[in-house]
Amino acid sequence: MFKKILLPAALLFSSVTAYADAVYFEASVNKRTVSLNESFVYSITVNGGGVNLPEHKMDALPDFNRFGKSASQSISVINGKTSVSVTHSYTLAPKRTGKFTIQPAEIAFNGKTYLTESIEIEVIPAQSVQNIPVGNNQQQPLQNTSGKAFVKASVDKKTAYENEKLVYKFSFYTNVDLASNPEYYPPDFSGFWNDGSKLKSHFEVVDGLNYRVDEMETVLYPVGTGIKTILPAKLKVSVMDFSASSIADDFFNFFADMKNGQTKVLETNAIEIKVIPVPQEGKPSDFSGAIGDFKIKASIDKKDVNTNEPVTLTVIVSGSGNMKSVSNINFGVYDSFKKYDTIIANASGNSKKFKTIFIPLMPGEKEIPAVSLSFFNPVKKQYETIKTSPQKITVSGMAVYPKENVEDKSKINMVRKDINCNKHIKTLEMYKGYLIEKPAFYLIFAPFIILLVLSACYKMYVDKISRNPLKKLKVSHFAGIQKLIKKAEVEISENNFEAAMNLVYKALIEIINIETSVVSDNLQRDKIAYNLRVKGANDEKIAEIINMLERFDFYKFASVNLDKDSANALLNDVKTLTLNLKK
């Protein structure tokens, strides 16, 4: 009975390969007809059982520029069955007019290959900027007397706390017709955690001229303190026609005397950010690095339960700020309950959902304790602590671990005396016969006795693992890491270096999870280092892991192509960590 009750908890908190019988796999776009100077979102969704879903593969997109990528994940547990949905969204922009086909994406599952449908995209010519009025009082379209284009870069704040959210904005102003869509080369965001980019467009009047403005907003979180520099961003543009240029003004006027179809590379200025540490004064003891302004609420899936029956506590943290810094929540004292680890069931830009399973051990009116979160509010420049209300439940049934009384102990002692008395009976001598006296008898039955002993030992090992969810998690995690490494080796052999890097990065995070017993995919490096140190890792090992994380960030955000040698080097380093992994 107890094992049946623990089964949904084990499924919920295991992050290893445990696929259901089928998966749901589809691709979609938010629009099928776009103009040359517009963007659209291409999304791939995988839904199925288990926590690790198969990775998708997609062909290169030679007809489109890829401006940004984001991922969202949700986990649900219904009647003990775990379902996971993962969506990868790509912001794409066409390079030229015409009709184009996005080829099917694919996944491999249970020895079969699943494909999405191909998607047709029609790209129409961009509407001329001169024909678009701007402003409520605009009666006639603006007529430009010169063709201009320029770029600007800005941030919403020049001074920020460590881990505080800041927004980098790249803006492209143009009032000329483009021969093709521009190619954007983002700056080096070294020293910042890049949380993804969004592309949007609008029209604006500058010095009496009508401009189309394409903006790329990138959310950044500073890592470490001091002066950090965002290097220039670049944009490669090709224009169809320009009229005579006017006298240069405060903006970057560069198209004078150009011919049709000429290409130019525009570049922004570098930006310096001063990053300061959060204050030490007034810092709560349970502060774990959360920066922003948040709210918290909690709920449970049932209020009337039996002892040994799992209750799922869901906690949702929402607000503005660095959601990645909200890595854990704090629980009060939970007597009379068995509590499992907390997982992040869902995370979006402005909220994060945590789930925890409690198992009541004693009957009566009980309370699942309040949950709290301490954070630093950069606007108010002070620390704040928010709490949920305790969750009251009614528990029926017998206590799981009843206390022994004097009468029970006396009965146990009487039974033990009877057992000790029976031990003096020489059963073997009573049944001694011809076969037992022969050595061959023992040789025949020796293998069966050995097999019985081994079976008993294995049964004890399995029972020990079942009673220890953390040990079970580590064993299953290790198997998952081996599968990720094998998949990465295949991807490298097929020259799919980006896919291989993603698999190797997942394996590294799984290793860190095992070493720290903490879900680390959303933690900052200093928090990961702290968790490793708490678990007894030496400085050399901590430095090695942090260095590997920095290398992954470099290849992820820098304008450097990952080659086969670099991919193999990352893979070999993770293999070395796996060999030294504590089981």
Image (tube, rainbow, N blue to C red):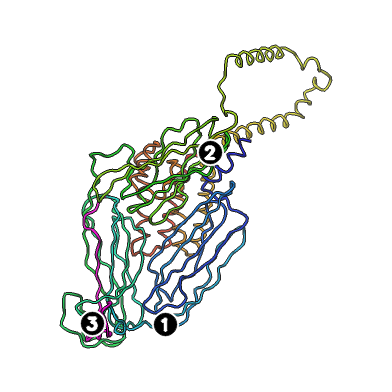
Task: Categorize mark 1 by other alpha carbons within 10 Å: few (<14), some (14-19), many (20+).
Answer: some
Pick the front one: 414 or 571: 414
The image shows residue 254, relative to residue 283, as above or below, that is below
Q: Quadrant of the N terminus?
A: top right
- Give the structural element (helix, strand or loop) at label 3: loop
- Gap in angstroms between the C-alphas marked 3 and 2: 66 Å
At x 62%, y 13%, the residue is 410
Say which residue label 3 marks.
255
Say which residue label 2 marks.
469
- Give the structural element (helix, strand or loop) at label 1: strand
- Gap in angstroms between the C-alphas marked 2 and 1: 57 Å
- Gap in angstroms between the C-alphas marked 1 and 3: 25 Å
Specify start and end residues of the magenta stretch as a single range: 135-161
Say which residue label 1 marks.
124
Q: Is the stretch drawn in magenta largely helix, strand or loop?
A: loop
Q: Position of residue 423 (x, y in %)?
A: 70, 14
First in sequence: mark 2 vs mark 1: 1
